[in-house]
Image (tube, helix red, strand yellow):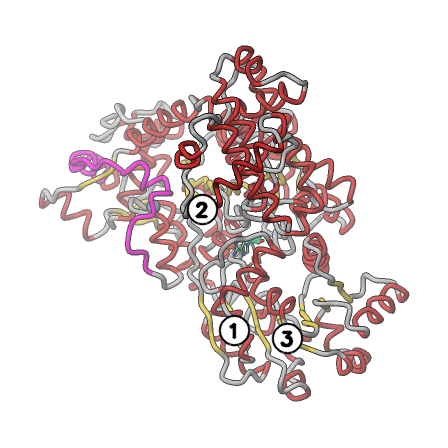
Amino acid sequence: MNQRAAREALKKYFGYDNFRPQQFEIIDNIYIGYDAVVLMPTGGGKSICYQLPAITLPGTCVVVSPLISLMKDQVEALKGNGIPAAYLNSSLSVDEQRYVEDEAYHGRLRLLYVSPEKMVSPSFMPLLSKLKLNLFAIDEAHCISAWGHDFRQEYTQMRFLKRQFPRVPIVALTATADKLTRRDIVTQLGLREPAVFISSFDRPNISLNVRPGQKRIEQILDFIGERSQQAGIVYCLSRKSTEQVAAKLIAKGIRADFYHAGLPAAERNRVQEAFTNDEVHVVCATVAFGMGIDKSNVRWVIHYNLPQNIEGYYQEIGRAGRDGAQADALLFYSFQDVMVLRDILTKEESKNTEIKLAKLERMQQYADALNCRRKILLSYFGEHLAEDCGNCDVCKNPPQSFDGTVIAQKALSAVTRLGEKVGLRMLIDVLRGSRRKDLLQLGYDQIKTYGMGADITANDWMDLLRQMLHLGLIEIAYDQNNVVKLTAASRAVLFEKQAVTLVRMSAIREQRAARKTKVKTVTQRQRVRDELFEVLRQLRRQIAVQKGVPPYIVFSDATLEEMAAERPSNERELRSISGVGEQKLARYGRAFLGAIRDFVADKTQEGVRVKGGSQLATLQLYRRGFPPEQIALERDVTVQTVYNHLLEHYQNGEEVRVQDFVSKPLIQTILLVAESIPEPRSIKAIYERLGERVDYHQIRFALAYLEKKGKEV
Ligand code: ADP
Ligand code: ZN
């Protein structure tokens, strides 16, 4: 199987034009019959890596997958592309199981998904040994490792596969695997010198943003307001806050719901399903929500609180934009969160507290970053990004630094005079000259620096002190009620006049605010595009409901977006959209083309200039029986333009009668002349040969006719 054949299959079955990085290499490796370990981030496109060989090689591929809901989605998606697939797990009745087994036995399935329990159960062996196997795919292969959090006992019992079926290649796939897990995968499955594919963990389509955790609900409402109808997740720290946030969003008319591990299983299923089917737009959830969601059109993820570590954070934001279309990650960050998390982690009964605290610190550094956030993320995973990403808030609004020596001196002086005995809040209140009761009672209004920082808002002070913390100018004594302490570096600032460079946070906030208003002045073109996208989304929903499948099984968001931008007007153009394979073209092509056409026609009627609108208006008048001259008058365009439009429609397979413009005998004459002159046949040459007695458009129509007939023969 060469790359071209593989690419043709990719287009035919999945509608994609190109492989993503590494996909073909992995597939090729399987074709040759080698084992492989594949590490790819969520949304990287792991499934295609085994599905394509499964489809193009003779026989059946058996896929082990640990989650029933994922299995179902995958099989649904495959069927949506016309690929025979089924699954076996405990959710099926005995009869259903028997039916699937029978299908498999008769070689009617290209892919058979099984749960790990099924795979290792002795009762499965007879069937397995009768199948013509082309590949074993072990999905979520990190479940094999006892170190990880998703450990599954059955995964460690699959060594027999290699022993019983030494000729069948095994591909193990996962999105999370450190070196240790990787080694476990290889040894436990008994893989033979497997090729190891490690893809970049970069997800460039996810825009990274961090904002101060103030007025979060207000900020979320703004954020969602700019993205109405889009699917998103708000991750919260506690079960209770998932409920509270959801309630506040619902009160504002947003279709939100909440999800956490404390809910009964049936309720969790309901929420997950409603989200999958686009009935619920926003789910406020704890981190319990996510594993098992195969929804490709989650457009944004908000972290209401700081996550505990970068691994978790990256996995959670990775649930956005799996279809490759633009997506947003927004993290709210406050120092308060850090303290709460530290508290939780230190109180937890665990040996690894130190490691966990260190991880939290890395998370905090990310949130505090003053350089490209993506660089920080990727470097955490051992990847180096050569250039700034341009798609994070820091890249978009580079911080402006200024000489913060005096500010730092004021703060440090206050810390000294307060005897290193107060926390950040009190420190700020002293600096700002607050009349807080306890402050006055303690006599803090008597110290020299009291009120000397009143010109800076409390929020800005918080930002500045956080920066000082990262510069090592102050320390927080987490074991002593979080009081602020001096460091060796702070003494250098206080007594040796060492200069301090800080970053103006308020300037960043202003820029952000300015950008927000700018975003709102969208172009007319963009608006039309959004409108059409909405129309297509509705259509997708109708079809999905009718067929009883999730909307993204019909088409992904990315595909609809491309349709809305390109506005294909015929099958050929529709086929060239990414995500439109043969099956989907046959099933949904007419409906979507019709919707796009109606939309364009409506817009043109309203006087909005839309790409393809003019052509369509011409066609409509032609269909109503108007001759070209009349159409030209009606539409205020030249007759030549009308001919061009109609010719284009004819070439695109619309019902345009050539004989309306050029008689049969004349076509014959033109064709004879055309054949008598050497290639390339220019219209002008034909025109001259015919003694300039025939119109250009007639020659064009005749040639188009010739081409079409030539193809039909
Ligand atoms: P993973 O299993 O790695 O999380 P998936 O296999 O579910 O990722 O793929 C994520 C999304 O990317 C799916 O919507 C899939 O159809 C799409 N996709 C995969 N490969 C390609 C490709 N070559 N071109 C365009 N989209 C792709
Ligand atoms: Zn960046």
Upstream in sequence: badge 1 or badge 2: 1
Upstream in sequence: badge 1 or badge 3: 1
Real-space Cα separation, disc 1 to disc 3, in angstroms: 13 Å
Judged from the image, the secondary structure of the residue bearing numbered disc 1 is: strand
From the image, tell me which residue sits under label 3. Answer: 135
Residue sitting nearer the eye, 455 or 91: 91
From the image, tell me which residue sits under label 1. Answer: 37
Lateral position of residue 81 relative to residue 35, left or right: right
Judged from the image, the secondary structure of the residue bearing numbered disc 3 is: strand
Q: Amino acid at mark 2?
A: Asn
Q: How many marks?
A: 3
Quadrant location of the N terminus in the rendered image = bottom right
Judged from the image, the secondary structure of the residue bearing numbered disc 2 is: loop
Is residue 430 in sight in this rendering? yes
From the image, tell me which residue sits under label 2. Answer: 205
- Residue 460 image offset from top left, x and y in percent: 32, 31
Residue sitting nearer the eye, 12 or 32: 12
Tell me if residue 114 comes above or below residue 484 in the rendering.
Answer: below
